[in-house]
Image (spheres, coloured by chain):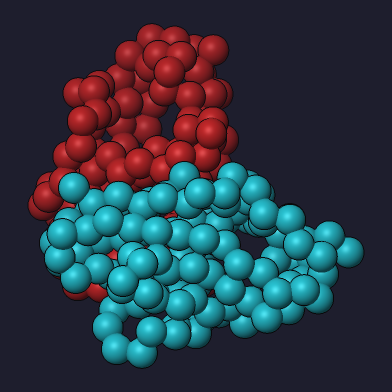
Chain colours: A red, B cyan
Amino acid sequence: DTAVSQTPKYLVTQMGNDKSIKCEQNLGHDTMYWYKQDSKKFLKIMFSYNNKELIINETVPNRFSPKSPDKAHLNLHINSLELGDSAVYFCASSQGRKGPYEQYFGPGTRLTVT
Amino acid sequence: AQSVAQPEDQVNVAEGNPLTVKCTYSVSGNPYLFWYVQYPNRGLQFLLKYITGDNLVKGSYGFEAEFNKSQTSFHLKKPSALVSDSALYFCAVRDMGTPLVFGKGTRLSVIA
């Protein structure tokens, strides 16, 4: 069983389009995250949700909008895609948000904007 | 603000030799420290973590890490490297309630 899954794995689209990436975890975790990994492999947190509530919203353009319909799902919608949005996006989850909990990562979604 | 430094972009080691991947950190409170590994086209996998207590932490796949408070370091080690250990390794730090901050990663290449 896949612990943290993301769809799609690859996403190729044109500038100006709107796209969504879905994430699901079956670990029963309370906290979920979205990270962006750029071409140099640098990993930066974008958002964090705890029990469907947004708790971290880093400096991310408001074209990016997360949505958590329940605590097992955290989707990422991106409007008006730009070339600079090309990256690998990782979803992750953890048991909680304040303790020393390790995070479990999904396989990533490679977004290419042309 | 917390930060992590991984001073080496690349570490090369011969198979069977011991390996060390370096990490230093800066955090205002007591640190929670983590090591993750990323294989090509995969997500990050948790290897081990330090919370408190024994300075030597053992993790998955024979890896261990040594916490040194005075040097603010948390180096990843393995006594005998395998070719299959070749991957990208990330050190990460947080304290209570703050987001996890990752280092820039160190690429480990184990040569047969």
Looking at the image, residue A16 sits to the left or right of residue A111; the answer is left
> Image height check: is B41 above or below B98?
above
Q: Residue at x 65, y 48 (%)?
A: B10
Q: Residue furthest top?
A: A16
Which one is in front, A16 or B74? Answer: B74
Residue A90 in the image, given as x and y percentages of width and height: 43, 46
Looking at the image, residue A35 sits to the left or right of residue B19; the answer is left
Looking at the image, residue B62 sits to the left or right of residue B82; the answer is left
Residue A7 visible, this angle: no
Residue A71 picture quarter: bottom left
Residue B6 in the image, given as x and y percentages of width and height: 48, 51
Residue B67 in the image, given as x and y percentages of width and height: 39, 76
Which one is in front, A21 or B40? Answer: B40
Q: Residue furthest front?
A: B70
Which one is in front, A105 or A7? Answer: A105
Residue A67 picture quarter: top left
Which one is in front, A38 or B111? Answer: B111
Residue A60 visible, this angle: yes
Q: Residue furthest right?
A: B112
Residue B35 in the image, given as x and y percentages of width and height: 46, 66
